[in-house]
Structure formats: structure tokens, C-alpha cells
């Protein structure tokens, strides 16, 4: 198949970048792949490094001038290459694909992945569902329920949860862990519980609630909690909240990491405490690394974790519930280790990249057959 992936994010891209990069790596040896994305984006850099993949710098703009720029360029690309599938990943690129396809006699099939919990009741969504969508992929059952309550319900909707490379995201050999902990947490980590996340430092990622939960513990317990948050450097206002919790010496910010494995694998527990979440690559990655996951009950997040078996599920923004989990972790570190092993088994059984890619190709084939 000839497949065009589109993504509108001009910079980091978060889970969209991971999603498309994972699919492209899995499919590039058997299919002709093009990725159209802004040349300023992390996806442009990542996809450009994958052999046999064509990368096209393209912006997905809503400006009227884009009729003669970006949309015209996209239309030329589609006409020249005659793609079988265009896989869109957000409203901006989906809109531009719809407009680029108007009037074409030979049209590729359009597959949409719904990555988030943004509302679907707009006129634009109704238009795109009618004119420029053949199949829809939901990244969780939570998202599927949203789609089935929208204009997309008239289309085939398939739930395909994120797949990850469980050989790439694998536990780090024990002899190297101490050196990694020294690097990321400093030499005073012994006797502490190390919690880590690569979900980023936005307020709605909930990491400040975890900081508040740790800060609410008695001093003898609080000093045994160290937290690592990978992502963009936090603002002065966020750092002030860390200080207000008395945790300024116990929260580490390694920055935005291209490779998060070492920073997370040296932790004891992973966390994703988002206020809104469709599924979460960050959660699946920490579990594959052999860490139990502390997650909120936002959106599709609970679909990753079995509460009390390979992680813990707490209500969104419930600092008291988080503090209770921290007490439990501090009281029984052996149980935490056993839950980490269970998380790794869950990842191997349910998060495999090969199954994710196979299910996605099945959707492409269904679209072509229809």
C-alpha cells in the first residue's frame, strides 16, 4: 500500500509523534510511506531518520491564504502519488485533507485516529465525517464511546490501543540501576521511593497534585519520596508550587528527553495523573519498563492498569488518595517490586507493537475493500 500520514503539530507533538513514528517503523519495510508534517516538528526529525520513508514538510493552516499554499501543495502531492490511504490524526490536518480532495476523481481512502477527548459535536466534525472519512480508529473504549455518540457513528469504528516496542522499552539490567539513580536523583536516593513520569510538566498532567500529596505526608515519610518529571522545563509559577509543598529538593526535572528509558527505568513507580487522557503512551512505556503505574481515572487511562495488581487508580486531582498510595508504597516495597513484574507481563501480553500495526493495517484493508 501507499500510505500518507499527516500530523499538524509544529513542535513536540506528544503522543501523536509516538503513534505515527511507531506505525511508520513497523510498516516501512512492506509499504510505501510518506509523512507530511511541519518541518519544525519532532515528528519531521524522527520520521526522517527511518529508512525508506519519505518526509514532506507541510503546515496545516486554517488561513484563507492556505488555499494557494499548503492546501494546494497537499492536493498536488495526493494527485502525483496516488495514495491508497491517508491516515489523519487531528482536526487541522483532517480539514485540510478534506478540502484537498474536493473534486478529485480518484481519491484515497481516509482513516482518522481520534487521539483525545475533545468534543465531536461541531459542524466541522459532521462535515468531515460525511465527506472525508472512511474508517475511524479509537485509541481506547472511552474514545470509542465518544465516537459512537457523534456523527462518526455511521462509519466503521475500531478500538486499537497503542502498541509499543516491548524489546525497546524493557527493564534495565540491575547492575546499572545504581549508576542511573545517581545520575538522575543524586547520591541521596538510597532508602527513598523514586517515582517518575515522562508525561510532561503541563498543569493538566497532574504531577503537581502528586507533589502536594508527597508534601502532605509526615516529615519522616515525605523525605523518602523523590519525584522525576521529564518534559519542558516548568514555569516559575509551577516551581513556586513545588516550594510551597516543601518538595523543592525532592523533585527533579531532566528536561525533554529524546530517550526516556534510563530516566524512567531507574524509578520504582511510574505515574500518569492527567486530568484528561485518551489512553497514554507514557503509562504503557513505564509499565513495559517494569514499573507499576499510578494513574488517575481520567478518560481511557484506567484501561491500561489493573488496580492493585500492576498499578493503582485514583480519582482525578484527589491528593488524599495519592497520599494514601504513597503510604502504601513506602510500607511495602516488596509488593511494589512484584507489581512492577506484573506490569511488565501486562505490557508483553497486551501492548505489543506487532499487534498494534497488524490491527491498523486490517483497518486500511477494510477501507480499501469497502
Image: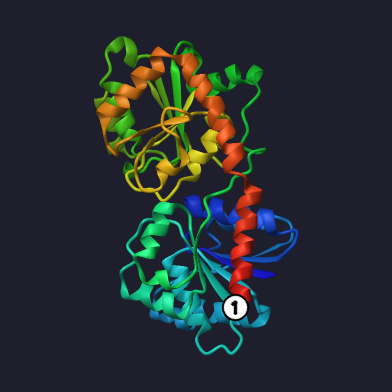
Left or right position of 345 against 272: right
Q: Is residue 12 visible?
A: no
Seen in the picture, residue 336 relative to 12 is either above or below; the reply is: above
The percent coordinates of residue 84 (x first, y second) are 64, 75
Residue at horizontal 73%, vertical 56%?
A: 51
Left or right position of 21 against 146: right
Q: Secondary structure at mark 1?
A: loop
The percent coordinates of residue 263 (x first, y second) are 54, 30
Image quarter of residue 219: top left
**In this orientation, which residue lies closer to the viewer: 252 or 7?**
7
Residue at horizontal 38%, vertical 40%?
A: 201
Seen in the picture, residue 105 relative to 295 is either above or below; the reply is: below
Left or right position of 86 against 254: right
Q: Quadrant of the C terminus?
A: bottom right
Seen in the picture, residue 311 relative to 73 is either above or below; the reply is: above
The percent coordinates of residue 146 (x first, y second) are 36, 60
Colouring used for the render: rainbow
Left or right position of 362 against 335: right
Q: Which residue is mark 1?
A: 108
Seen in the picture, residue 64 relative to 305 is either above or below; the reply is: below
CA neighbours of label 1 inside 10 A, class few (<14), some (14 to 19), many (20+): many
Count of labels in the image: 1
Image quarter of residue 360: bottom right
Q: Is residue 2 visible?
A: yes
The percent coordinates of residue 238 (x first, y second) are 30, 36
Residue at horizontal 39%, vertical 15%?
A: 330
Q: Quadrant of the N terminus?
A: bottom right
**In this orientation, which residue lies closer to the viewer: 172 or 77?**
172
Amino acid at each position: 500500500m501507499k500510505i500518507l500520514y499527516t500530523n499538524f503539530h509544529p513542535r513536540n507533538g506528544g503522543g501523536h509523534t509516538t503513534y505515527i513514528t511507531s506505525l511508520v517503523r513497523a510498516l516501512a519495510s512492506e509499504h510505501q510511506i510518506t509523512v507530511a508534517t511541519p518541518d519544525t516538528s519532532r515528528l519531521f526529525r524522527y520520521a526522517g531518520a527511518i529508512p525508506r520513508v519519505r518526509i514532506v514538510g507541510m503546515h496545516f493552516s486554517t488561513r484563507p491564504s492556505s488555499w494557494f499554499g499548503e492546501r494546494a501543495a497537499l492536493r498536488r502531492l495526493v494527485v502525483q502519488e496516488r495514495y491508497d490511504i491517508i491516515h489523519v490524526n487531528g482536526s487541522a490536518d483532517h480539514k485540510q485533507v478534506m478540502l484537498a480532495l474536493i473534486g478529485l476523481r480518484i481519491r484515497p481512502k481516509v482513516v482518522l485516529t481520534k487521539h483525545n477527548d475533545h468534543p465531536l459535536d461541531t459542524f466541522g466534525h459532521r462535515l468531515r465525517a460525511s465527506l472525508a472519512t472512511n474508517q475511524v480508529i479509537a485509541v481506547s473504549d472511552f474514545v470509542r464511546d465518544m465516537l459512537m455518540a457523534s456523527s462518526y457513528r455511521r462509519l466503521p469504528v475500531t478500538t486499537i490501543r497503542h502498541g509499543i516496542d516491548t524489546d525497546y522499552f524493557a527493564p534495565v539490567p540491575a547492575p546499572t540501576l545504581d549508576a542511573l539513580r545517581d545520575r538522575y536523583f543524586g547520591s541521596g536516593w538510597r532508602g527513598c521511593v523514586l517515582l517518575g513520569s515522562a508525561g510532561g510538566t503541563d498543569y493538566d498532567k497532574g504531577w503537581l497534585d502528586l507533589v502536594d500529596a508527597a508534601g502532605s505526608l509526615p516529615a519522616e515519610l515525605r523525605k523518602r519520596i523523590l519525584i522525576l518529571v521529564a518534559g519542558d522545563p516548568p514555569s516559575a509559577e509551577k516551581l513556586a508550587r513545588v516550594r510551597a509543598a516543601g518538595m523543592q529538593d525532592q523533585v527533579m526535572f531532566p528536561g525533554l528527553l529524546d530517550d526516556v528509558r534510563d530516566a524512567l527505568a531507574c524509578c520504582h513507580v511510574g505515574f500518569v495523573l492527567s486530568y484528561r487522557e485518551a489512553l497514554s503512551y507514557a503509562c504503557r512505556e513505564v509499565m513495559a519498563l517494569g514499573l507499576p503505574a499510578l494513574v488517575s481515572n481520567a478518560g481511557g487511562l484506567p484501561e491500561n492498569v489493573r488496580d492493585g495488581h500492576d498499578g493503582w487508580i485514583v480519582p482525578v486531582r484527589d491528593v488524599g488518595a495519592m497520599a494514601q498510595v504513597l503510604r502504601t508504597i513506602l510500607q511495602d516495597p516488596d509488593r511494589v517490586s512484584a507489581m512492577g513484574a506484573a506490569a511488565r507481563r501486562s505490557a508483553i501480553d497486551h501492548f505489543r507493537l506487532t499487534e498494534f500495526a497488524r490491527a491498523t493495517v486490517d483497518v486500511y484493508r477494510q477501507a480499501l475493500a469497502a
